[in-house]
Amino acid sequence: MFKKLFFTLVRKYRHATIPRWIILGMDLILFCIAFFAAKALCNGTVYINLKQIAFEFFTALVCCFIGFFISGSYRSIIRHSGINDILKVVVAAIVPLAIQWSANIVNNNLHFIPTQYLLSYRESAMIAAFLIVLMVIMRLSAQRIYNDYFKHRRPQKNVVIYGAGAAGVITQNALKHDQYFEYRVVAFIDDDVMKIGQQLDGVPVLGSRTVMSANFVKKRKVQQLIIAIPGIRNLHKQAISNRALDLGLMVKAVPHINNWIDGSFSSNQIEDIKIEDLLSRDSIELDNANVAREVDGKVVMVTGAAGSIGSEMCRQLLQYQTTKVIMLDQAETPMYDLQFELRNNEPYKKHINKMEFVIANVKDKARMREVFEKYHPQMIYHAAAYKHVPFMEENAYEAVFVNVFGSKNLADLAIEYGVEKFVMISTDKAVNPTNVMGCTKRMAEIYIQSRSTDKTRFVTTRFGNVLGSNGSVIPLFKKQLAAGGPLTVTHKDIIRYFMTIPEACSLVLEAGAMGKGGDIFVFDMGKPVRIYDLASRMIQLSGLHGIEIKEIGLRPGEKLYEELLATKENTIPTYHPKIMHAQVRQYKLEDVDREYSKLFDELITLDDMRIVAKMKDIVPEFKSNNSIYCSLDKK
């Protein structure tokens, strides 16, 4: 019965905080032990002069109370005692020692109390030393008892920390106070040979080859790797992460110190490595002064402003000294979201006076003329377009109307209203197109290129997929993972190029600034990524098991790989290593106008087969793939 009652009380009150008066009472008991132990050791036997010993005890007790009050040692939660609490204990013992020594010095000169009624210097020092030892032992014992018997046992995780610098030590300390897991750091990894073989808080510092091996991981039962190098280069981070994932480890990283909350760091700020981290490249160096000279003091219009690329273009342009940024899109809800973001968040809301939000469709020439008449843009970044390959394969009329004739409307109005520069954002799918969408973008390129004049300069930028853009594969995989799988890929060998949205937009601004007219610039997209491998990595990063990757077959118009340049084209370098100038075929304006007029006549018929057939006449390299339009290709 008593045993049952005891454990019931333990379960009920095991997380309760001990009241301050109990801690103060325990500390006073420890003072009594320290006092009489010191008296006994200093004098051989305990004094039997009760009056003298009572006076000494009372004065020492008053001094001790003062020490406890000044230090606040009794206010701490002893089961969570740390270095600061130990310092409070030292202060609590040093204060009465200082008071008693000061009293002895004064009494030696004034003799207001008989010397035998005051504790000697030796006795005072010994009481202070005993008190410090006893109070520290009591707190550490309470902490150990709570952790071993009363604290809820957290699941244990064995981790290694990559980085034996200051961030690594801070990470280790943060892990000790995690509420959900009991982390055990089995090793630090560092690339500095001077640190290898040393220890941090009893944990060995080892080389990456030693730790990042299947034998070490299995032997030490390592479950997780934490990268604690906040300023690490992307390529180095990717190499570490990929090796850890191959070993079956979960990978996390410490954010840059600028992102620590109020300058402090806790375990819940350790971030999961995302697939974007494994695909992104080292930050690119841009000539912002060159872009500034191009856009400062200008009225700049961005079409497709609510999209992934368009919205980032607006964010970056607002950072320059533009007079106005006209943000135009036909999608109402995304435009509202963009407006709310820019008007309410730093660092954009301070530029609210130069923001203009316009709902319009680029294929509506009358409405676009009204916009030009009202704002008179000096620069245009044309990002508005339909981009989804399967949708456009089924809706050729709409793809041609928006992507080709919408671009034509803008180009014609740009010349009419004296726009200085027109920068069109194209795609790698425009090269040797195998689908309607890619062909419409190539046709827009051809028209833009043919219209360049000394007064209005037209520039085209061409790049591949961007990470996290609307409708891209990564958000799709994330949704499929959240639903428990499977992850679907169209073909096991399909590859794509990727870059981040901010990187792509920065390169667009840079290429636009360097363009002289009639240029097509191609971006260095890095190495291609196999989508099947991308899906596998995302499953590993999620920590989920048993998620299937299902191959569903190529969609209409889709090809296994994308090209950045047609076979008859080549490139020459520019002053920026990530931007190349494409040497492309030139088209005569009168030929382009004649053929596009014929295409518009076909558009009026609303017959997709006739529309696509005419597109193939204009762009002979357009060969349909896995599509109903394959029958139109000449054998």
Image: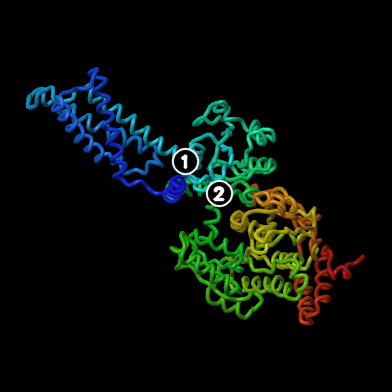
Q: Name the image quarter holding residue 303.
A: bottom right
Q: Which mark is residue 271?
A: 2
What residue is rendered at 27% in x and 32% in y? 31
Whether residue 524 is visible here, answered yes or no, is no
Inspect this view and state whether residue 345 appears.
Answer: yes
What's the residue at 44%, 41% (across, down)? Answer: 146
Label 1: which secondary element: helix
Residue 581 as seen in the image, left or right of residue 287: right
- Within-10-Å neighbours for mark 2: few <14, some 14–19, many 20+: some
Image position, residue 166 (x, y; %)? 48, 36
Pointer 1: what residue?
Answer: 147
Residue 420 image point, x, y percent: 58, 65
Where is residue 208 shown, x and y percent of the image?
Answer: 63, 33
Left or right: where does residue 421 sit relative to residue 601?
A: left
For the view shown, which residue lies furthest in the front direction? 1
Alpha carbon separation for disc pair 2 and 1: 27 Å
- The quadrant in which residue 245 appears is top right
Question: Where 236 sits versus 480, above or below?
Answer: above
Residues 289 and 250: in front is: 250
Quick check: 575 above or below 403?
Answer: above
Q: Nearer the viewer, residue 610 or 80?
A: 80
Which marked residue is nearer to the observer: mark 2 or mark 1? Answer: 1
